[in-house]
Image (tube, rainbow, N blue to C red):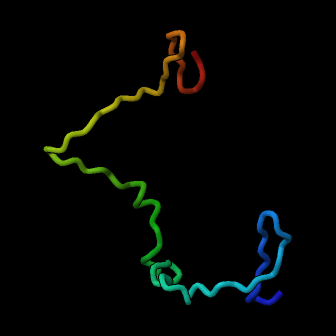
Amino acid sequence: MDGNKCILQLRGVRPFLSDKFDITRHKRYKQLSDYDKKNAFDVEAYMKHQLKIRRKEEFDLYEVDGNEETENGTERLADGEQ
């Protein structure tokens, strides 16, 4: 198969050949990591991000212990034991 072609599989339609889209012609191509490696999404940095709270900012604090109360009043542990 030609390198500029691909097989598209869409629900309700038989697979068919189509031309590949040249992403370098897209108007937002410069925002991709294919254009510049600095545009790559850094998952590690995203996961390490900490929310910074200002001194005068109000917020609600909830404490969660991993247990939940059942309908009959007994606690069920997070791993399913009682």
Q: Residue at 79% of width from left, 70% of height from top?
A: 9
Give residue 2's quadrant in the image.
bottom right
Question: On the rendered image, what quadrant is the C terminus found in?
Answer: top right
Q: Which of these two is toward me, 66 or 11?
A: 11
Relative to 81, 67 lies left or right: left
Q: Which of these two is toward me, 73 or 35?
A: 73
Q: Position of residue 47 (x, y in %)?
A: 42, 54
Relative to 61, 71 lies left or right: right
Q: Position of residue 63 (x, y in %)?
A: 35, 29
Q: Residue at 44% of width from left, 76% of height from top?
A: 39
Q: Residue at 83% of width from left, 73% of height from top?
A: 15
Q: Position of residue 73 (x, y in %)?
A: 50, 10
Q: Which of these two is toward me, 21 or 52?
A: 21
Give residue 58's quadrant in the image.
top left
Q: Position of residue 61 (x, y in %)?
A: 29, 33
Residue at the far front: name it.
12
Relative to 15, 29 lies left or right: left
Q: Residue at 82% of width from left, 68% of height from top?
A: 13
Relative to 55, 73 lies left or right: right
Residue at the far right: name it.
14
Height in image: 55 above or below 30? above
